[in-house]
Amino acid sequence: MGNFDRDRITAAIREILLGIGEDPDREELAATPSRVADAYAEFFAGVGVDAGAHLAQTFPVPAPPVSTLTGQPSANEPVLVRGIAFRSICEHHLLPFTGTAHVAYIPSDRIAGLGRLAQVIDTLATRPQLQERLTEQIADTIDVALAPNGVLVVLDARHGCIVTRGSRQVDSSVVTIASRGTLSTPAARAELMGLISSGFAGGAGL
């Protein structure tokens, strides 16, 4: 993150402490501006970073089996990665939202390493974000980089701005969905949504 200005953030946090009526020089707060700057360096590490670069290395799709009925290759089946933990910072209040991402795509002729999908999400999440936009950006990045037949992204997150302030809805979460290509209709993605929400293969669903 080439434009990260640690000194400027440290000075700004000191001003915030003064603004709320605190003494930034008292022993317990003296190192707080520096600690917040360190945290912000991590929270916003994705600013200016190309998330698609994580998908630059791809591999050919294994040949699908030939149908015994038609004699033609079967269609490629979806790749689904469930339960990818993420955290981001809401740009409206600079409070965190944390949750789980589920990502599926139907390959055309290339696939990516499974861990690369988590790296895409982490890069896009470590920016000031809105969950709705983050969901779309993940789908767009996969769609552009891999040119798959279809993409489905589901995020389920709890927001600090809802949980800790205002109405303080401590049990609420927000679910957002983005889809591309052959997975753009509810009918086409129904099986994947079922797998995501059913606890299939061990982890928790939505």
Image (cartoon, rainbow, N blue to C red):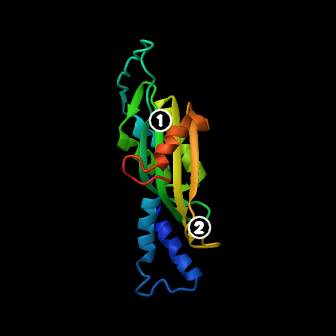
Q: Position of residue 10 (x, y in %)?
A: 47, 71
Out of 103 and 13, give the one closest to the viewer. Answer: 103
Can you give x and y, in whole percent of width and height, for residue 121 in the image?
Answer: 46, 48
Q: Nearer the viewer, mark 1 or mark 2?
A: 1
Upstream in sequence: badge 1 or badge 2: 1
Amino acid type assigned to the residue bearing label 2 in the image: Cys
Q: Which dot marks residue 105?
A: 1
Q: Is residue 140 visible?
A: no
Residue found 56% across the figure and 76% down from its top? 16
Instruction: In the rendered structure, find residue 20 and report the number of the disc placed on it.
Output: none
Query: Image point 37% across, 20% down: which residue?
Result: 65
Query: Helix or strand or loop: what does disc 2 sit on?
Result: helix
The residue that appears at 44% across and 77% down in the rendered structure is: 32
Tag 1 near tag 2, CB within 8 Å = no
| 184 is higher (above) or lower (below) than 24 | above
Q: Which residue is mark 2?
A: 161
Percent position (x, y) of residue 5?
Answer: 47, 61
Q: Quadrant of residue 36?
A: bottom left
Residue 69 placement, left or right of 165: left
Q: Secondary structure at mark 1?
A: strand
